[in-house]
Structure formats: C-alpha cells, structure tokens
C-alpha cells in the first residue's frame, strides 16, 4: 500500500491520491485511464470583490473544481472557511465523484469554496459574497452542468441566494441549479437530516455484522453540527446509546447515554456542550480514546491520524465527515481489525437526497418524507453490501473496496463514451 510522506499526511489532495492509486493498482487500470480518472476536468479560481458594511472594499478568493462529468453533471457542496484551499477543493471534488459512484447516482463530483471567516461577517456581507461568487462561476454551473449544495458554513439560505442570482441572469426561475434549498423554493423533505440518517443506516448494518443489537450499542460522535447532531438524535431515537459528544472546546460523556435533545437545548442556551447535567467533561483527545462500539467522526478532515489511530478503542469507525481519517492511519486501523465504513459510503446520504431533490425539481412533483427516507434507506443499505461484497471478492479492506467499486463504475462509463478528440 502506498503511503504519503509524513509532511503530506494532512494534505487531503495527497491522501485522496494515495487511496486512488491503491485502488487503481488493485483494478489493474492502465496508465491512460488512471490519468483521466485522477485529473480534475475543470478548476476555476475567482476574485470576489465586495463592499463591507463599514464601506471598505475587500477581495475574497473563491474556487470551484469539477473533478468528473463522466457519469452525469457535477455535484458538490460549497463551503466558507478561512482555511479553504485549492488542494482541499480538489480532494473533496474527487471524493464526490467516488461517493456518487459508490451509491450509483448519475453524477460526477465537484466542490466549491470561498476563503472567508463567516463568524466575523454580517448576513448582508455573506449575501454579497455569495451573489458575486455565483456570478463569477455562472458559466460552469447549471442543472445539467454542475449543481452546488450546502457544506461547511453554508445553508439553505445560501442556496436560495445562489438560485436567485442564477435565475436572474438566466431570466427564468431555475430551481434545479442547487440542492439543499428551502422547501418553499423547491427543496426536498428529508434533506436536512439526510447525511445523519445515512450514517444511522450504515451504522445499523455494521452493528449487525458484529451481532450487536442497537439497544446494546454505544456510540461516540465527534462533531455536533448538522451531520453529527442529526446522527446523534436519530440514533438515540432508535435506542442506540450515544455516550459521548466531542466538539472543538471539549467533550461530554455519560456511560448510560446522553439525552441528546436536552444537550441540544443546553448548547443553544449556553453556546457550548460543556458542563451539561448528568455528564462529565472530557478533553477531545480523551474522548476519542473511549471504549465504544462505534466512533463516528462527523466534523472535518484529519481527525484520525497516525498519531492517535493506535489508541482508538472502538470496533467500528463510521466516517460521517469527508476525509476524517488520514491515509497513514488506514493501515493502522486495518492492522487492528477496526471495521471502517468509509466516508465515500457513510456520508453519502446527503448527496443521495440531493439527487432526489434535483429529480423532484425536474419533475415538478414532490415526494412525501416517508418516501424520501425509504428510498434513501434502500440505496444506503444496498451500497453498504455492494462494498462488503467487493471487499470480500478482492480480499481488501472496506475503503479500498469502496474506491475500487467507484473507480470501476466511472472507468466503465468513460470506456463506453470514448475519448472526444
């Protein structure tokens, strides 16, 4: 198995490349196909000048990377953060390609981002940034080209601004240009819960493999935002004990299970999960080492690394975030026999229901939430067993199996289409 230089462990693009090469080697892909599959099809860097509320002019930098359109239009979120980088966008776009292929959606992968700190920007400033960014990437997005969605520090309001800006330029209301929109603008029922619900479905199937009944299962969740918080809420409703929640400022732990609804209320009231009644505060590092059945990292990249992978005390890692495990840590987890549900499978619930939203927008006919959730469950469960079957047939761990399955599907589409020249 290839491994990155130590200095590259936290570079998501380098990690994505290592996993790609490992899977490509197992599939015996020729050099030409490897070059096509690993090269982003389009990378756009844009300047975003806006007038701040105090009258000053600031110029922000934005990116949109389209990794592949072999299986359909590109699909991927837009994030706002101070540490957004082009390498991060490349990695996330490629992961979207493989994610869509693993769950067999007719999409390729894309990702976008703006270098900014939303915490110090007003709502009006964020709207100005969003609309100017949309105008700058207008030529490469569209319902049949590239469909953005919310990601870190963006939400349904951001998507509404993008949809409106695009529609104003096109002189027609185009709801299908983004997903993750408000319901009144063509959004889908079940979309806000989709990624967390997808994590629930694959966690449930992984527990079956270990013959652990949900009522006896213990889960530690890192991250309490849209993905981690929703996964915690849904798991608790299923009788699964969420014993610890980890956030940036520390963790709270209760061996008998946390009251998730009460913890959410506590955080709304205090701004933190810490000092929650009937729980004890722990450091984030301590919490990651807790004994549990499932560890669910649901925040950012590079949480499980070569430095802490050997100290994890779980049976299953279910990756609710994108890239929470570095490539060097993969080998450690595999040697220890920890069962990994990789990110390109585990957190595919969001893009799956985004696909449902896009389909509903194009039909002009909307489904009830029961139907959305049933179809999500069917796709997530079937994809879980597709990956396990591939792992068994090729004698590889789950992450390599998921990549192999994805690469095989995308390569097959490219061979069918041929090369345009």
Image (tube, grey):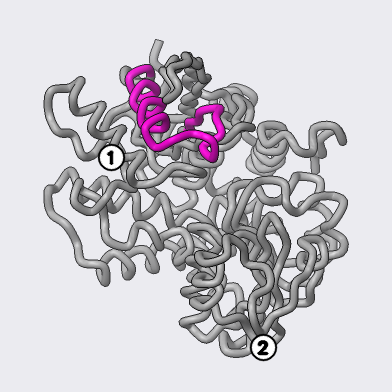
Residue 10: x, y in percent? 76, 38
On the image, numbered disc 1 is attached to which residue?
A: 160
Sort mark 1 into few (<14), some (14-19) or many (20+) by Cα contacts within 10 Å: many
Main SS of the magenta part reads helix
Position of 311 relative to 173 (above/below): below
| Left or right of residue 309: residue 134 | left
Q: Nearer the viewer, residue 22 or 225?
A: 225
Q: Secondary structure at mark 1?
A: helix
Sort mark 2 into few (<14), some (14-19) or many (20+) by Cα contacts within 10 Å: few
Q: Quadrant of residue 85?
A: top right
On the image, numbered disc 2 is attached to which residue?
A: 256
> In percent of the image, x 13 and y 23: which residue is there?
171
Task: Tell me, yes or no, whether the highlighted magenta stretch contains residue 130.
Answer: yes
- Residue span colored magenta: 111-136
Q: Nearer the viewer, residue 35 or 345?
A: 345
Q: Earlier in the sequence, mark 1 or mark 2?
A: 1
| Left or right of residue 222: residue 189 | left
Quadrant including the C terminus: top left
Observer able to see residue 146: yes
């Amino acid at each position: 198995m290839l491994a990155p230089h130590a200095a590259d462990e936290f570079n998501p693009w380098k990690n994505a490349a290592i996993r790609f090469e490992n899977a490509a080697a197992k599939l015996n892909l020729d050099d030409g196909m490897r070059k096509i599959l690993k090269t982003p099809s389009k990378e756009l860097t844009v300047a975003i000048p806006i007038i701040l509320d105090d009258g000053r002019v600031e110029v922000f930098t934005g990116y949109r990377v389209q990794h592949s359109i072999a299986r359909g239009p590109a699909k991927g979120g837009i994030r706002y953060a101070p540490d957004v980088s082009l390498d991060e966008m490349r990695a996330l776009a490629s992961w979207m390609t493989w994610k869509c292929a693993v769950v067999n959606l007719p999409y390729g992968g894309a990702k976008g981002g703006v270098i900014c700190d939303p915490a110090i920007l007003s709502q009006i400033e964020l709207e100005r940034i969003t609309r100017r960014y949309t105008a700058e990437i207008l030529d490469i997005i569209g319902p049949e080209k590239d469909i953005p969605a919310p990601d870190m520090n963006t939400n349904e309001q951001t998507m509404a601004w993008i949809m409106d800006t695009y529609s104003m330029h096109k002189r027609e209301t185009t709801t299908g240009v983004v997903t993750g929109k408000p319901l009144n603008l063509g959004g889908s029922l079940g979309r806000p819960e989709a990624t967390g619900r997808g994590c629930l479905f694959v966690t449930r199937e992984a527990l079956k493999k270990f013959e652990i009944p949900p009522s006896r299962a213990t889960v530690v969740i890192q991250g309490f935002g849209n993905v981690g918080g929703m996964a915690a809420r849904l798991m608790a409703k299923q009788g699964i004990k969420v014993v610890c929640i980890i956030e940036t400022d520390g963790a709270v732990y209760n061996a008998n299970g946390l009251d998730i609804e009460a913890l959410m209320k506590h955080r709304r009231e205090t701004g933190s999960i810490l000092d929650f009644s009937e729980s004890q505060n722990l450091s984030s590092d301590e919490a990651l080492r807790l004994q549990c059945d499932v560890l669910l990292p649901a925040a950012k990249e590079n949480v499980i690394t070569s430095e802490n992978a050997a100290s994890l005390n779980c049976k299953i890692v279910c990756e609710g975030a994108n890239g929470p495990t570095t490539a060097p840590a993969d080998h450690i987890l595999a040697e220890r026999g920890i069962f990994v549900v990789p990110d390109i499978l585990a957190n595919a619930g969001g893009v799956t229901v985004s696909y449902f939203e896009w389909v509903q927008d194009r039909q002009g006919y909307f489904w009830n939430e029961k139907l959305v959730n049933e179809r999500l469950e069917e796709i997530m469960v079937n994809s879980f067993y597709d990956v396990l079957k591939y792992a068994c047939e090729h004698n590889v761990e789950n992450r390599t199996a998921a990549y192999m399955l994805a690469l095989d599907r995308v390569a097959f589409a490219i061979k069918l289409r041929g090369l345009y020249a």
